[in-house]
Amino acid sequence: MKSMSHGVLSLGGLLALGLLLGCSPTPAPAPAAAGPLKVAVTVAPQGYVVARLGGRRVAVQVLLPASANHEEYEPTLGLLTGLSGAALWLQVGPEVFDCGKAWAAKILGAAPGMVAVDTSRGLTPIARNPHFWLSPRLVRQTLPTLTAALIAADPAGRDDYTRGQARFEAELDALQAELTGLLAPVRGKTLLFFHPAWTYLGADHGLNLLAIEQHGHEPGPGQLQELIETARGLGVQDVFVEPQINSRSAATVAAALGGQLRTVDPLAADWPGGLRQAARLFAAHAR
């Protein structure tokens, strides 16, 4: 994205703070906080994470509605107006998800002085998949960047944010252990998805994930039939779908396999609860 006058820290300043830059490279000082620090996040699970780090010091605004598909998203006038005074936008990061989208410029323009932070920096993507937040292990790795961003915008809260990070790291370790316990019995088994959002959770727990959609595109008839034959050979019947995406091909595949569509929500606001629910479903239906 080209440079804009939207108050994003210079690279030198970011390095000094241990913070990595988001989309816009124009330098400007962080705004002074009045009341709770207003923080924009792209998806609801990020909001859960920021609230655990900042507690009452932060007021979180989620940009992408729970029912929205990021590929078709367009921010409303009400949302843009509500961003006034926001100090930070904590982006998912990869250009395929938010900071490379046309609507990112509208978000930045709605809040002069807002600092955009790419929270995925330092993580290793799998096939440009942006859904890092579905892995507690990877979320833990982003905490230093998030905490540094909060401290840069609200220096008076340094101790609170540092303690919040330590508490939340312990919570993430416990959640990771819980998910391991749920998924260990199906390690090495296969699940079939329409959209490959759960790639990182699957990788963390040794699951083999098949996906109908690849790189944002549905397969042609020949590829779809090949996928059906592969799944049938593995004994897979059910197809996991997301409430944000409507796909007739998922229903076609499930019917061909004699299975059902099963919904898991990658944007659940109750982030740990959503992960637990998904893990239980995966454990019950992996083959």
Image (cartoon, rainbow, N blue to C red):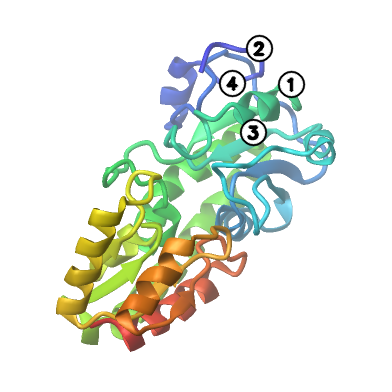
User: Which one is closest to the eye, mark 3 or mark 2?
Assistant: 2
Which element carries disc 3, helix, strand or loop? helix
Structural distance between the alpha carbons of marks 4 and 1: 10 Å
Sequence order check, earlier mark of 4 and 1:
4
- Determine whether 230 is above or below 180 in the image: above
Q: Is residue 21 visible?
A: yes
Kindly indicate the quadrant of the structure image that contains residue 273. Answer: bottom right
Q: How crowded is mark 2: few (under 14 residues within 10 Å), some or many (20 or more)?
A: some
Name above or below for residue 103 compared with residue 37.
above
Provide the residue designation for mark 3: 153
Residue 112's disc is 1
Number of other residues with Cα within 10 Å of mark 4, as a class: few under 14, some 14 to 19, many 20 or more:
many
Lower sequence index among marks 4 and 3: 4
Q: Is residue 272 left or right of residue 121?
A: right
User: What residue is disc 2 on?
Assistant: 5
Question: CB atoms at circles 3 and 2 under 8 Å apart?
Answer: no
Residue 133 falls left or right of residue 63: left
Residue position marked by numbered label 4 in the rendering: 8
Q: What residue type is labelled 3?
A: Ala
> Can you see residue 170?
no
